[in-house]
Image: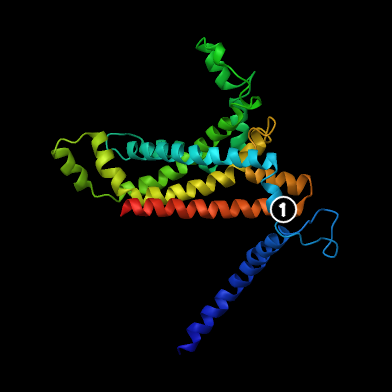
């Protein structure tokens, strides 16, 4: 009788295991191998050569790669922090008893998270359009014409336009996580604080935030990963990495090298570097937040 459940479990796991090996493990191993070769669109399995770490060495001599890395790091420093800040504020406000129509506002804030990233990019491209964009029209209405810019066409502003779109798209997603965690906090804790004279801000600072540290740590790691992944699509749609690479990010540069320049070996080395960087950042972030919880 004990063998039957074991056999049943094995039969159920085998298809999943085969799919995982076929769709994830083998392609990953192939990508790692290609990153150590000079593979291009013209090379074959017989003609491509193993070149060791040359792709990785050249990577740090490539000014375009360094620029994309710098832009990615800027986004990683700003976007997760700002996104989670707004998510936490929205979550706290929408869990207050005096707020009416909570369901409506939750849906409104969450809605951008379910929109296609391409659509998000198009929406924000229209917002930042220099002639027809909403932002410049608002500035003109407020008699602030001196603040008007070709937002997506200037090196100083293009990257931060992408950052704004990233924050808008992701804030509602993390807000839902925080709402679920806040709902799990006993109401008696807030009532006791109210009796002691604590206001809304004090409750938020001294009760909500400390009790959500674990959730905040997890969402920060998710936000880091999301920023790396989602910035590619939004940057591609809104600016195509321009002007002059001012809004180019690592995954976009990888795509350019692989799909447009057909430099597959170098493209895979950028992909492996990005993956390793994401893992290291996630581990460090989780370690730091875990230590703070202790």
Q: Residue furthest top?
A: 143
Q: Residue at x 63, y 34 (%)?
A: 247
The image shows residue 278 at horizontal and vertical percentages of 55, 51
In the image shown, does 129 or 28 lie closer to the viewer?
28
Q: Residue at x 52, y 54 (%)?
A: 280
Would you say residue 110 is visible in this rendering? no
Is residue 270 positioned above or below 89 on the image? Answer: below
Is residue 134 positioned above or below 144 on the image? Answer: below
Would you say residue 81 is visible in this rendering? yes
Please tell me whether mark 1 sits on a helix, a strand or a loop: helix
**Seen in the image, is 109 located left or right of residue 239?**
left
Quadrant that contains the C terminus: bottom left
Q: Residue at x 85, y 62 (%)?
A: 47
Q: Residue furthest left?
A: 195
The image shows residue 107 at horizontal and vertical percentages of 44, 39
- Which picture quadrant has residue 253? top right
**Seen in the image, is 62 located left or right of residue 205?**
right
Quadrant that contains the N terminus: bottom left
Q: Total marks drawn?
A: 1
Residue at numbered disc 1: 55
Is residue 236 positioned above or below 15 on the image? Answer: above
- Which picture quadrant has residue 95? top left
């Amino acid at each position: 009788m004990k063998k039957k459940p074991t056999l049943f479990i094995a039969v159920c796991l085998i298809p999943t295991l085969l799919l995982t090996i076929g769709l994830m493990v083998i392609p990953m191993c192939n990508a790692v191998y290609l990153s150590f070769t000079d593979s291009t669109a013209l090379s074959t399995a017989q003609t491509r050569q193993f070149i060791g770490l040359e792709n990785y060495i050249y990577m740090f001599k490539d000014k375009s790669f360094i620029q994309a890395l710098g832009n990615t790091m800027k986004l990683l420093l700003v976007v997760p922090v700002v996104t989670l800040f707004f998510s936490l504020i929205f979550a706290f406000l929408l869990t207050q008893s005096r707020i009416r129509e909570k369901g409506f506002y939750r849906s409104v804030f969450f809605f951008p998270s379910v929109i296609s990233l391409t659509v998000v990019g198009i929406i924000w491209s229209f917002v930042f359009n220099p002639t027809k964009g909403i932002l410049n029209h608002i500035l003109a209405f407020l008699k602030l014409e001196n603040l008007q810019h070709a937002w997506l066409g200037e090196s100083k502003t293009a990257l931060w336009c992408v950052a704004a779109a990233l924050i808008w798209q992701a804030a509602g997603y993390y807000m839902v996580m925080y709402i679920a965690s806040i709902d799990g906090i006993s109401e008696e804790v807030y009532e006791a604080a109210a009796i002691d004279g604590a206001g809304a801000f004090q409750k938020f600072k001294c009760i909500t935030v400390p009790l959500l540290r674990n959730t905040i740590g997890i969402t920060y790691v998710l936000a880091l990963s999301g920023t790396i992944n989602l910035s590619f699509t939004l940057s591609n749609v809104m600016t195509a990495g321009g002007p002059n690479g001012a809004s180019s990010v690592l995954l976009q540069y990888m795509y350019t090298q692989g799909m447009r320049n057909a430099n597959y070996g170098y493209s895979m080395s950028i992909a492996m570097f990005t993956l390793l960087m994401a893992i290291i950042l996630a581990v460090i972030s989780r370690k730091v937040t875990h230590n703070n919880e202790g």
